[in-house]
Amino acid sequence: MSDQERTESHLVDVQRRFPVQTPWYYRTGFILGTLAAVVLVGAFLLPQPGRLSTADKAVIAVFFGLALAWGALLFSDPGKPEWTKTVTAFGLLFLAGWLFYRYADAQWERLNHVFFNWQLMQEPAEGGESAWMVLFKGLGITVQIAVFSAILGTTLGLLLAVFRAFNNRVLNLFIIAYIDFFRSMPIIVLMVLIYYALPYTGITLSAVASGILALGLNSSAYISEIFRAGILAVHHGQIEAAHALGLDSWKTMRLIILPQAFRVVIPPLASNYVASAKDTAICSAISILELLKSAMQVQAFRANPTPLIAATAIYILLFVPLTRLAGVLETRMRVRRARG
Amino acid sequence: MREKCAPEVMIEVVDLHKYFKDLHVLRGISTKVMRGEVVAVIGPSGGGKSTFLRCMNRLEEPSSGHVYIEGVDITHPYVDVNKLRTEIGMVFQSFNLFPHLTCIENIKLAPMHVRKVSEKEATERGMALLEKVGLADKAHAYPDQLSGGQQQRVAIARALAMQPQVMFFDEPTSALDPEMIGEVLDVMRAMAEEGMTMVVVSHEMGFIREVADRVLFLADGLIVEEGTPEEIFNHPKEQRTKDFLSKVL
């Protein structure tokens, strides 16, 4: 008898003495049957849309809650076959979409005309330009504000972090107060203050300058914290080694600390740039004709929300790759740190 | 053997004290280091060996007392610390090479930015030093591509590039795997033979016995005993020294 045969016969022996059976609720047939039942109930047996009584709403909520709970039980059991989970995931997602479509009580048939009226986007608008042109001009201003506020925020943030690293008590108190102030100040409040309140003191800034300043000040607070973390992450021995070689504090900062800090801060910095680039939409509050405001204007003029949908699409197309990039940088950094 | 005509005082330490808050780490250290001398500092951990070394180039500020290097009191507030440190090479236990720079860049950084040597000259001198520590082929490698022993040899070359008057070694082999200790000690031995003034904090008793001219036994912030390796290792006078040596030898 070979080893393998012996092991197999042993297994058979154990199974005979302790019969291992799949319980009924574990079997594939039951799982699929339940799924089919849930989908069928969802499709045909729930109350008709229209005026729903409270009891009807409760029935729908309980039904969907049960479906979710049942899915959660399935997903959390590592012993269940993977394909049943895949089928269930599709089933639940379909169900959620179906319930929304059925009970949202919306005029879905108007959707194409209202939301996706691309014809309207191409027609020349009031100034002889097509809606697309207006939106792209807005996009240009959005990009311009994002870039300049990032430059302003980075410069200020880096300066604050470097000065903070020298550990002067008075200066640090000021820097901490600055950071706390701008981090707790809602950007829109800051922007409105700069654009509408500051002129009373005689300091008048253009709308775009106000937007850039508000966004830049806000992100400088966050960026300075990022740089500070990067500077603190540089091992103290590095600073000692630099000092022992006779490098003064500024040279140590410039040649030893910052180059090492920059590597650490690139991923969080990238995420921060993406976040504050999205915040440019706040500039619509002080009537800068950036992407969102341009879209809102065309929408008001045409009484059709398609421009807003187009603006959304532009934001998504712009920011999904950037968010992805920031995520990739972060993962790469984490991998490198785990290795190193 | 090294020639030592006309012994000249290189470093003189007078009644050096150091407190860390309430902790009295150095309790009055006085000693002299002659030019060309190799002084080893031994003693139990926490005894103040590293602090003593670091007070002498003001990586730690001495609390009181004086340190004269070539006659200049470096504890004086008007002393240019950075200038002072260019005269003192320091090698750390944890190497502290700059990880964002290659070996040759590590070495030529300080000569270029502190001594204002031209890049060409700094590179040439750096390559010669790498040759000397046996790592010329690693000039363009980054520190994390090197073994511990290789990193420490580069760190020694980096310190030597400033052409210091004296070299401090703060437990240079304590962070190394045993098989790499020898290569670092060989480099240090060669430096001693060339007549470099060295102060070495180390636990490598065999190396100290062979290379050091004088041994300081430092415990509880005081120099308990000092003498030639022969005196300290073979005929220690103080009980404290005997206890320590019986544990490490």
Image (tube, grey):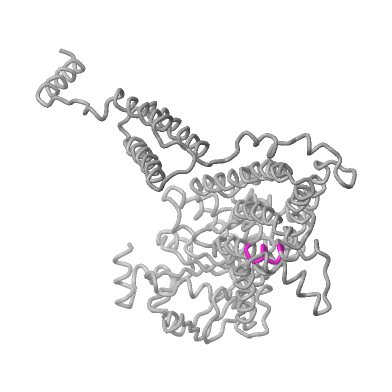
- The front one of A246 and B129 is A246
- Taking the image as drawn, is residue A30 in sight? yes
Task: Say whether residue A298 is left or right of residue B208.
Answer: right
Q: Nearer the viewer, residue A230 or A3?
A: A230
Name of the residue lying farthest toward the top: A1
Residue A23 coordinates in the image, percent (x, y): 21, 28
Residue A232 location (% of width, % of height): 56, 64
Position of residue A17 in the picture relative to residue A229 (left or right)? left
Residues drawn in magenta: A215-222
Is residue A165 shown to the viewer in this render?
no
Quarter of the figure with residue A30: top left
In the rendered image of this protein, does residue B202 appear above or below residue A338? below
Q: Residue at x 49, y 61 (%)?
A: B93
Q: Tell me residue B74's x, y (percent).
A: 62, 81
Q: In front here: A61 or A92?
A: A61
Q: Please say if B48 is above or below A334.
A: below
User: Where residue A22 sits in the image (x, y, percent)?
Assistant: 22, 26
